[in-house]
Image: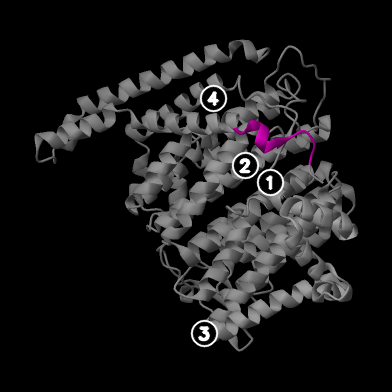
Amino acid sequence: MKSFQKYQFHAAFFCLAIALILWLMEVLFIASSKSSHKESQYAFEELAYFIHYLTGYKIIFPAIGLITAAGLAYILRNLLTKKEERP
Amino acid sequence: MLFLISPYMLMAFLALAILALPKYLRLSAIIFAPLTALATLWLYPIATENPFDFISYTVKSFWFGYDVTWIKMDIIGRFMASIFALTALAGGIFAFKLARKKEIFVAYLYAACAMATVLAGDLISLMITWELLAITSLALLWFSRESGAQNAAMRYGLWHFLGGALLLSGIAMQMATSHSIAFASVNLNSFSGYFILIGIWLNTGMFPFTSWLTDAYPKASPSAAVFLSSFTTKTAIIIMLRLFGGEEILMYPALITIIIAGIYSFLEDDMRKLLCWSILIQVSFMIVGIAAGHELAYIAVPAMAAVHILYKSTLFMASGIILHYTGESRMSKISGLLDDMPVIFGLSLIAAVTSMAMPLTAGFLAKTWLLESIDKGHLYLGWVALTIMSGFAILPTGLWFIRFVFGSDESRQQKPMIPYIIPQLAMIIPVSLCLLFAVPSLWNLLLHTPTSMGSVFNIKEILHALQLIFISLALGFFIMKWLYPRPTYTVGIDWLWREANLIYKQNAIQPAKFRIRITHIFGEHFSALFDLISSPRSPFLRAKAVSKQSFEVFVFLAFFIISWVLFS
């Protein structure tokens, strides 16, 4: 892990690629296991179920949360930190 | 008689041997005391096999005109007490080389009190064990020789005794109104319920009481921090689960806490404070589970608490060893420890991936159950909020700690060091449990989980967990450049009253200076009011002259008596 700073962006792209592959795997898994939710009475339910996974909400939602929190932290950085410890 | 051979009494008595025995025999006492407590726990019979039923074997005595249940050996209590005993074992072995015998003794008493609190069967036994827990944790912090520990202990004590006073007030009101000391009699339909809730809430460290945790724990000694991080918040979680399971109102401050702790964790430079913010995030997750109140939460929340104790104690042990050897806990000043401490890095990495709920670790099962319990409890807002917040919730321990403590930058140099073997061996205990608890059937044995709960270990949940981990890591690596730790101190909510206290102290000595400032800011009218308050004949100053503390105690007691009269 020496001079890790240089490879931070490489690591980020690597993790992003894996996350996208996992999302693709999930979509394919849901599509291939269509018989597992036979109980859906209407076709639109099937479609809604599929779209629900197609959105990749397990990637999008945490990403929104993380970027928002990090952005707020960056903006409030000078307000929330001091150079000297409080008495 | 059974009370005397109760697990926690045995642990407390056996801990005396730590003080009495010479150093070469002390380790045997450190190992023997928690293991005996653990064995005794499992010798107690449990009356029911149903984890949702709290009717169980009890030990009672007659106090204050009530049958006080000192031990209620239900499945959750036994499970949590077992985890406390195992953590005490690991913490004791860890402390053997790093702490004084007095400190280890007090730490064991603290662990015994934590066990007693989760086994308490009614409000009176809860009150007594709760106060003992506060006293022993305060003593543990007091014995720390780290700089600033004494002052932090004072602040910690003030907060916890305030919490204890509120809990006592609530319980007294409860006894006066319902004439019952049963846990079932507590609810939020009465004023007493809110007193009890705030008393317990304070111990969880949730908003607006986040400051005591991030203030006290980083100032404790390396070994004390392991114990402190494991017991106080988790006992509060278990008691809250028993008393307030299903109260939706708990969810909102818990969500606020996650946001605050998430933002602060990005700004933190102190590695132990970073772990404290992570504690707050994880405890908030558990509280949202409690708010859901689904019967699955009665398994998921203790499971999450147990797993959290295991990986967080490992990380506190790692940070303790680093602090002990480098004398530094600022991430901006230490880094690149991978080459010097490869074993500690490996063990910390396992703890970190457990905290991220990686499949094949205990964290995966616990977190999946927790989210499922929130979903099944129809707490959809909580479920969506936790899904959104999961991204930054896993970063403090999952990426920040590992990257900035063990990863190196070219410009930074460390001197080589060889850590002791025994503290590293101690770290193996919680780490191996993190991996062992990844087996669903083990949970079935310990928490009597329904076999259907093992079904969360399926491809869909595994893919979801991995997606969350990798997208969080990807974004974490991206933003790292802009949020690199700087040698600064974070300013929490406590800054408000600490600054107010400073201003008060400065101006109490120099009232004339304060008057000029008041006149400058608010004009002459307000300075006339100030003259009235601060004149030698002022009732405020006369009360202060007698004794400031007694005046404050008087105000609190008056408030308590008036509330009792009004609401009883």
The chain letter for the residue carrying disc 3 is B
**Which three-letter amino acid code belongs to the residue tagged 4?**
Gly
Residue under pointer 1: B214
SS assignment at label 1: helix
Residue B361 position within the rendered picture, expressed as x and y whole percent measured from the top left: 50, 36
SS assignment at label 4: helix
Is residue B9 visible in this depiction of the protein? no
Residue under pointer 4: B476
* First in residue order: circle 1 vs circle 2: 1
> Mark 1 touching mark 2, by CB under 8 A?
yes
In the rendered structure, find residue B177 and report the number of the disc placed on it: 3
> Mark 2 touching mark 4, by CB under 8 A?
no
In this rendered view, identify the residue nearer to me: B194 or B506: B506
- Residue at mark 1 to residue at mark 4: CA–CA distance: 23 Å
- Residue at mark 2 to residue at mark 4: CA–CA distance: 17 Å
**Which three-letter amino acid code belongs to the residue tagged 1?**
Thr
Tell me what residue is drawn at x 36 percent, y 41 percent: B456
Region of the chain picked out in magenta, as a range: A76-85
Residue under pointer 2: B277
In this rendered view, identify the residue nearer to me: A58 or B316: A58
Q: Same chain for the residues at labels 3 and 4, yes or no?
A: yes
